[in-house]
Amino acid sequence: MDKPARTFLLFQVIPSTTDYAFGSELEQALRAALTPNDTLLTLDNFSDAVTVAYAKKLLNESTEISVILDIQDTDQPGGAITPLLNYLHKHPVTCFYHTESRFLKPFLTKWKATRFEGHEELIQLIQ
């Protein structure tokens, strides 16, 4: 029997739009590990209104939501990340994070987030 469809939102912070590398190592590892029924949406601090609207649509239609926070302590999330995390704060989610920060602490606490060291460990956690 197939696993139920899951939605994964991967949040990353990039310094500028020219620094975005489509298909980061973490994103590639996630895509390889997910089933065809799963959805992975990568968001960053430069995500546009269309991407944010799509993320909200996915959230409202999903029964199993996982948030992956690949945000460093020194990062200033801003942009689309802060409003989306606040929107997500109302939903029951499974949360994974790489580095704790003051910005993330309220979300990590509410969601009882699980820390991962590298993408190999994250893949084990989501399977």
Image (cartoon, rainbow, N blue to C red):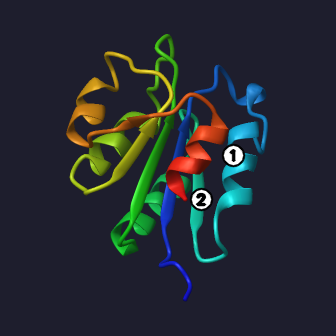
Measured as percent of width and height from the top left, residue 1 is found at 55, 89
Q: Is residue 56 visible?
A: no
Q: Is residue 19 visible?
A: yes
Image quadrant in which you'd find residue 106: top left
Residue at 46% across, 25% down: 77
- Amino acid of disc 2: Leu
Secondary element at tag 2 = strand
- Amino acid of disc 1: Glu
What is the number of the mark on residue 94? none
Residue at 28% across, 42% down: 86
Question: How many marks are shown on the rendered structure?
Answer: 2
Mark 2–mark 1 Cα distance, whole angstroms, equals: 9 Å
Q: In the current view of this chain or complex, which residue is farthest to the bottom? A: 1
Say which residue label 2 marks: 40
Secondary element at tag 1 = helix
Residue at 49% across, 64% down: 7
The tag earlier along the polypeptide, 2 or 1, is 1
Q: Are marks 2 and 1 in contact (CB under 8 Å)?
A: yes
* Residue 33 vertical position relative to residue 73 in the rendered view, above or below: below
Rate crowding at label 2 as few (under 14), some (14 to 19) or many (20 or more) other CA atoms within 10 Å: some
* Residue 9 vertical position relative to residue 110 in the rendered view, above or below: below
Q: Is residue 18 left or right of residue 79?
A: right
Image quadrant in which you'd find residue 107: top left
Assign the C terminus to one quadrant of the image. Answer: bottom right
Say which residue label 1 marks: 27
Measured as percent of width and height from the top left, residue 82 is found at 37, 34
Measured as percent of width and height from the top left, residue 35 is found at 64, 71
Nearer the observer, 92 or 78: 92
Q: Is residue 57 left or right of residue 11?
A: left
